[in-house]
Image (tube, helix red, strand yellow):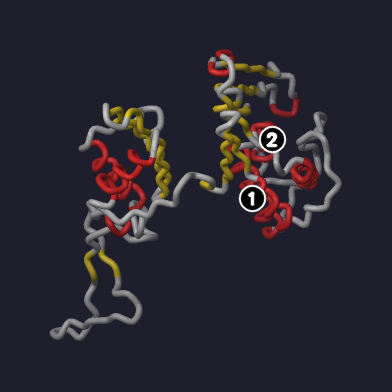
Amino acid sequence: VSNAFARAPVSEKLHVVQPTGYTRLDPKTGKPYVCRLNTGLYGTKQAARLWHQMFRNHLLADGWRQYETDSCIFSRYTHKYGHEYIGVYVDDIMHICKGNTAHAAFLNKYCNTAFPTTSQGKLTWILGMEIKRDRATRTLTLNQSQAISSLLDDCNMRDARPLSSPMDSQWKYGTAPKITDDEKIREYRSRVGSLMHFQNCTRPDIALAVNKLCRHMHDPNSACFTALNHVLRYLAGTPNLGIKYHQGNSSSLRLEAYTDSTFGSETNDKSKSQTGNVIYFGGGPIDWTSHL
């Protein structure tokens, strides 16, 4: 959506200084006018929420239903177009439907009538994820190989010797002194933040390692950097690893859940249990977590 935030009306009274290069003065006082903000502005705290509310109301008025479990997902069924789904991430919209006719109607009737929208065709990239579809085998694959390769390049780890596991099973925070260099701390937080994005989207295999690294965002030590480099070396050997879904036999379309726990066996974490779970559907994981 073009300039999405600027299309949503502001619900509060907000005032801003005049933009650079455009200044009008009050003839009585000689001072610059202060502008009343009528629509959302990029950089204001509530701009994204106001845009989402506007788009939401636009859909609900035409029969779409918003999911309670995820407020960014909408669905609708009509006799003419069948089932349709919409996923919204700020101003990026993913429309799932049965054919081009339904998609064209969605663009022309529900989007372009209210705000200019550009269709980028069939979905191949979204939020740094590459989406590959093979209709012959009825499979869909998600990966973040490009983003992972970029991170490895930034860390000078592209040619590092690969490791076969995300983390040493015996790793502990230990007694090494905390790092006090602000630049090193920012580097640690930045790299772990990138790993969190991979773990949340397409790499459940690094969930445990990332969870342990995240516990020390405020007090990393040399052991944390060793573990961080361990994860990066693992990714260097598996950059193309992703998630694959398929419509095979009936068992692949059955919801399956697995869970396990250490039952407080990690003494360095004050006897708290490390718990993990993963839920499969369509032959691949659709939800996973690892936490204390």
Q: Where is residue 79 in the image (x, y as percent from the top left)?
A: 27, 27
Q: Position of residue 274 (x, y in %)?
A: 67, 24
Identify which amino acid the numbered label 2 is placed on: Ile
Identify which amino acid the numbered label 1 is placed on: Ala
Q: Can residue 278 be seen in this view?
A: yes
- Determine which quarter of the picture holds residue 129: top right
Image quarter hosting the N terminus: bottom left
Side (left or right) of 109 relative to 261 = left
User: Residue 45 — which label?
Assistant: none
Which residue, given by chain and number where applicable, does mark 1 sit on? 147
- Mark 2 or mark 1, earlier in chain: 1
Q: Position of residue 92 (x, y in %)?
A: 42, 49
Image quarter hosting the C terminus: top right
Q: How many marks?
A: 2
Which residue, given by chain and number where applicable, does mark 2 sit on? 206
Q: Position of residue 157 (x, y in %)?
A: 78, 53
Side (left or right) of 247 relative to 80 = right
- Front residue of 190 and 111: 111
For residue 87, above or below residue 269: below
Q: Which residue is drawn at 69% across and 22% down?
A: 271
Contact (Cβ within 8 Å) of mark 2 with mark 1: no
Q: Which residue is drawn at 20% across and 86% down?
A: 30
